[in-house]
Image: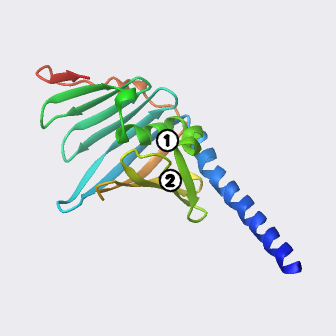
């Protein structure tokens, strides 16, 4: 009987600790009102190879996020609550798409913009005190997203899609909840850009 009681106490304590760590991830993301960072993105396509990208990330909570790539060539993803704008200087094309029509592209945006939605969309698995794995509750084209924190600040996001492709984004030189020039969101494209609206 004592062993059963001890086991129940142990399981209760473990669940409480996991819940607390689980909340740590959400609380860390909730604290972000503005964010500016440099990022390196490594994308591995199954059977094709690996590509590395670099750029800057800007976030204005509840309003917009800009992933502004400068290497290997200029491109950007500008997310607002209503729309995604994607520009690629190689194709000279700008694609605008309503947010409700987005799939995987919208997931990281939603995680950063509305962290309180995490538990309604994902099962959260605590890997350790700094790593969390998110498994979708429904099919969204992703196997999982892994988030790494350092000193309660988001440092890395790794995702694996249903085709086995991996994307790893590492954030550096983070500036959180400090003012920055909001004109960065007023991204301009060349006049000869072809525009597609969906």
Of residues 35 and 103, the one nearer the viewer is: 103
Of residues 177 and 19, the one nearer the viewer is: 19
Q: CB of mark 2 within 8 Å of CB of mark 1?
A: yes
Q: Position of residue 111 (x, y in %)?
A: 49, 41
Q: Position of residue 148 (x, y in %)?
A: 50, 57
Residue at 89%, 79% (x, y): give it: 2
Q: Does dot 1 land on a helix, a strand or a loop? A: helix
Q: Position of residue 142 (x, y in %)?
A: 38, 50
**Alpha carbons under labels 2 and 1: distance apart:** 11 Å
60 sits to left or right of 91: right
Most extreme residue toward the front is: 1
Of residues 1 and 109, the one nearer the viewer is: 1
The nearer-to-camera label among 2 and 1 is: 2
Location of the N terminus by quadrant is bottom right
Crowd tier of the residue under label 1, counting other residues whose Cα lies within 10 Å: few below 14, some 14–19, many 20 or above: some
Of residues 14 and 63, the one nearer the viewer is: 14
Residue at 63%, 45% (x, y): give it: 27
Location of the C terminus by quadrant is top left
Residue at 80%, 69% (x, y): give it: 8
Give the number of callouts.
Answer: 2
**Residue beneath disc 1:** 111
Q: Please say whether residue 196 is visible from this viewpoint.
A: yes
190 sits to left or right of 62: left
Q: Please say whether residue 157 is visible from this viewpoint.
A: no
Q: Quadrant of residue 165?
A: bottom left
Q: Earlier in the sequence, mark 2 or mark 1?
A: 1
**Residue beneath disc 2:** 134
Eyeballing the image, is 47 above or below 175?
Answer: below
Q: Quadrant of residue 182?
A: top left
Q: Does dot 2 land on a helix, a strand or a loop? A: strand
Crowd tier of the residue under label 2, counting other residues whose Cα lies within 10 Å: few below 14, some 14–19, many 20 or above: many
Q: Quadrant of residue 18?
A: bottom right
């Amino acid at each position: 009987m004592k062993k059963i009681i001890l086991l129940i106490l142990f399981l209760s304590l473990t669940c409480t600790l996991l819940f607390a760590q689980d909340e740590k991830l959400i609380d860390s993301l909730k604290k972000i009102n503005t964010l500016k960072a440099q990022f390196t993105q490594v994308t591995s396509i199954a059977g094709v190879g690996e590509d590395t990208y670099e750029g800057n990330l800007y976030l204005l909570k509840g309003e917009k996020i800009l992933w502004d790539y400068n290497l290997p060539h200029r491109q950007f993803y500008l997310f607002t609550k209503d729309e995604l704008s994607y520009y690629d200087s190689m194709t000279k094309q700008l694609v605008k798409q309503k947010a409700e029509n987005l799939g995987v592209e919208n997931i990281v945006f939603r995680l950063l913009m509305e962290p309180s939605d995490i538990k309604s969309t994902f099962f959260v698995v605590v890997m350790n005190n700094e790593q969390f794995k998110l498994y979708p509750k429904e099919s969204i084209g992703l196997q999982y997203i892994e988030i790494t924190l350092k000193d309660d600040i988001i440092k890395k996001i790794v995702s694996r899609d249903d085709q086995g492709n991996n994307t790893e984004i590492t954030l550096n030189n983070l500036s959180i909840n400090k003012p920055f020039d909001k004109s960065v969101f007023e991204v301009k494209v060349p006049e000869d850009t072809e525009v597609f609206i969906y």
